Amino acid sequence: MNSIPLSILRDSQSEAGFFMLKHGQSNYSVSSQLIIWVTLICLILTTTLEAAPKKKKKAPPLNLPPLKTQEQKMQLLGYIRQTMPTRKIGSRISFSSADLDKALEQELGPATKSFAKIIDDETFIRRVYLDLTGELPSPNRISSFTSSQNRKKRSILIDELLETEAYARKWARYWTSVIFYDSEANKNRISPKALEDWLTEQFQKGAPWDYITVMLISATPQRNKKVRNDFGQKYGPNNFVLACENKSTELASQTARIFMGISIKCAECHDHPFDNWKREQFHELAAFFHPYTYKMPDKDDPTVKTTVKPRFLLGEKPYETMKSDARRVSIAAYLAYNPKNYWFARAYVNRIWSEVIGDGFYDVDSLGPDSDVMHKPVVNRIAANFRYKDFDPKWVFRLIMNSKVYQREMRTISSSSELFTAIRPSRLRPDVVAASVKNLTGEDKKLRKEIMEVFDMNPSLPQGALEGSIQQALLLMNNTTLQSKLSASDLKKKLVSISADEEMVQELYLNVLARHATDQEIERSVNFLKESKQRPEAIDDLIWVLINSTEFRTKR
Amino acid sequence: MHTDALLHLNLNRRGGISRRNFLQAASLSVAGSTLLSQFQLNAEELKKEGRSCILLWLAGAPSQMETWDPKPGTPNGGETKKISTQTPGVEIAHYWPKIASVMNDVALIRSMTGKEAAHERGTYHLHTGHRMLGIERFPHFGSVVAREIGDPQSDIPNFVSIGQTLSSGFLGVQVAPFIIDRPGQLPANVFNSTPESRQQRRLALLSQQEKDFTEAGAQALVKENIKLYEKANLMMKSPKLKAFQFDDEPTNMQEAYGKSQTGQGLLVARRLVEAGVPFVEVRTGGWDMHNNVFKGMERRAPDVDQGLSQLLIDLKQRGLLEKTLVLCMGEFGRTPKINARPPIPGRDHWVKNFNLLMAGAGIKGGQAIGKTDENGQEIVDSPVQVDDLFRSMCKAMQIDADMELHTPIGRPVKLVESGEVIKGLFG
């Protein structure tokens, strides 16, 4: 693995298109370009691929092409990507949802006895819609799905939803929240919306996760002083760096947290008490992001500073004379393209798993020692295959959602021995609650804003650590806009027009909770109607009850 | 059965009046005075029942050299001068003249020493008494107080924070902070125009709906929701809601606290404590002065100086100070050496020695505990660990510091793991 096999490069020449972003770039011939790239790739990746870099002779001068623009950086990264040895392996290996189930069953051992039942079609369609689109399926959609005789309909639905704009938007919102949730950046210098839009575009066209990551990491936003408050935030990919206020230490800890799932922030000040991360390592990582020479402040006296040279967590060092732009490119390469950095693939897998299953293999962004990972062989296998599949985000969704693990009934998981024997009922994210409300009331910007604030949740905390609030209850019970809009809603009108009680109740449940009412629920609701003096008012009450039910804001 | 709680919501069990009566009462001056006497009654009850705590959190970590431990005339001292106070021999930085005038009620700790020099971790340590190490999330001290002292049936939350703060961790929503962003306003959506009987029918039906969902496997979420709805419904009817506002405070009282966010927050804090809330946190940011520490202090200090000194005066006049612990602190201290950061130097993070202010709840005022050397770089007398501080807070609140908390996996942890009560702090 010491040098890059040229054949791989040539083989993949044609595939490099994805990374050749702008058409007008290839003015000089591909072959001469290639020679430059090959030199470069060797220079950047040698330390990556060598176990222990030996003392090298005086290095030849580094003839880097310009790496100022994002396009130039991505072009280089695109070539590095093509050299990944794992690409070859990927074409020979497969890992199916059935393999996943088998691997997990082996891992769980006796716990498989407490496996929950496989869900029915109605629960499945609601679950998969919420997970993939953040919206509820319409009553028509539910009925066409449940009545379909196609034995592959679940898997077809997954594929179908993965192609929607709603899928891309939902996960763009999730990652935007991951990046901005704890950001202390000045609001005038960031644009979460631009990031969300850019991510939406990427997810929709199926951009690989490594591409998205290296775009975010290697960005170097420039301030345009001619325009007030223009820090480059309108360009979506700049916003990860802007969320970190372009601070080296913040970029280091956020890169490790979000893209590797490990928590090294505390190593900023002291050696990590449980981990292998040392204080110096943190600062070496920070040095990578520094435009010039990075100095680590002394623990006791901040006026005393020692120069620290950039070094990635696995010991990789960039070429010494590299400029900061090139260093950003190389850290992106170390992060995504060093196959030994298994954290990168695993962090993505664990986040998605955690979101759709309700529990992760570990807390998504605060992994300490590797021994904290539950059922490690399973997550490591998924992660390895995610790399083989060229970091295709949709592959992970397909793998998990077609498995039995995903299609089990919910249960409140209270001990780690029960992990993954059922789905943990999960709180819906704020944008999903807002969408469910909008589905009933129609668009209302002010109401949406309030819901987004009141239901906001830290996307990096495990479901089990999240909490609801009194404010949420107050909003759903009393908010005057919500109440009046519901009372004047199309749904309400429709329900009032249905004179048969039972039919009306079914329509109500299908529209609000996206499922049929149970016999018990019908009986209860019909009794309620009978005991009420005014039917329209009673219908308002029934809507109110469902909106305020835990189920309305829960994925079951 | 928890689900039954919703069915039998007895909204008047604490003598609360229904919302409609409440509104009528508020509109009639005669009935309005009943409300006032109810407040006073609560204050009376409070004196008998237990203690409360107001934590003024200076987020970002204020500099000890510019607060209670100035070192003018030394290389580290900078532009900060010292002023004498009501207490002979205790001198503080010149930004705090009003605090100086109430020093006889205040104890300063000048020899705090901590372990965490990053904001998030320091904030966690100084709010929970535990360092952020494993995956367990320890409760905010306010949540512990809410659980130990607060009335579980209280119709307003037992822990209010003006500004975002830490959560109740593994103690759960029952004692989670009720967060309001701006002091002086009623919490959003507390009013409901639905007639009482109709609301009761809705809640009854809701409780059955929830029962079904519990059976379907979501018991933890449902249980939490039932608690939240119960609390929300109590709160909607509570006459104590008025404590969140201060329009009925005399103008001179509002002015005495100051029109700043901090001043108003502290006024609301006093009103909440008076209404029986055992823990209120008030947050004010902007203390992370890596740059321009002296000018920064001139800008930030006056609001806190005014609000905090008035809070102490006010609590004392109302006879509440002896039962109310007042704490003013941040997550750590700042480097005694002034950094060379362009454009205007400031001070960086420093955890070896920092300081804080305590008052009330049996604490002996007019003293400064602990001492640092002349450059402010070493503690030379009576170092105080975070554990010692928490033991002292527990003593002030009459809570057993050795009490065991149970983490979600059932591991027992002491509320405060070690340390001892700060010597000489209590009279």
Image (spheres, rainbow, N blue to C red):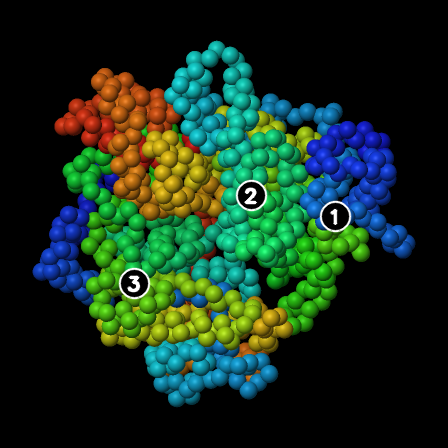
Numbered badge on residue A67: 1
**Label 1 crowd bin: few (<14), some (14–19), many (20+), radius 10 Å:** some
Tell me the quadrant of the picture where the C terminus of chain A can be found.
top left
- Residue type indicated by callout 3: Val
* Alpha carbon separation for disc pair 1 and 2: 22 Å
Quadrant position of residue B267:
bottom left
Q: Nearer the viewer, residue A237 or A468?
A: A237
Please name which of the two marks, 3 or 2, marks the residue nearer to the observer.
2
Look at the numbered disc 2 and give the secondary structure of its residue.
helix
Inspect the image, locate mark 1, and give the three-letter code of the amino acid beneath it.
Leu
Same-chain status of marks 3 and 2: no
Report the residue at 61% width, 30% height from top.
A205
Which chain does the numbered disc 2 sit on?
A: A
Position in image of residue A197 (x %, y %): 54, 39
SS for callout 1: loop
- Compared with B65, B234 (above or below) is above
Pick the quarter of the image with the N terminus of chain A: top right
Tell me which residue sits at (88%, 52%) in the image.
A60
Taking the image as drawn, is residue A172 in sight? yes
> Which chain's residue wears label 3?
B
Disc 3: CA contacts within 10 A as few (<14), some (14-19) or many (>=20):
many
The reply to whether discs 3 and 2 touch (Cβ–Cβ < 8 Å) is no
Residue that numbered label 3 is attached to: B268
Residue B191 to residue B322: above or below: above
A528 left or right, relative to A42:
left
Q: CA distance from mark 1 to mark 3?
A: 56 Å
Q: Earlier in the sequence, mark 1 or mark 2?
A: 1
- Chain bearing tag 1 is A
Tell me residue A351's x, y (percent): 56, 39
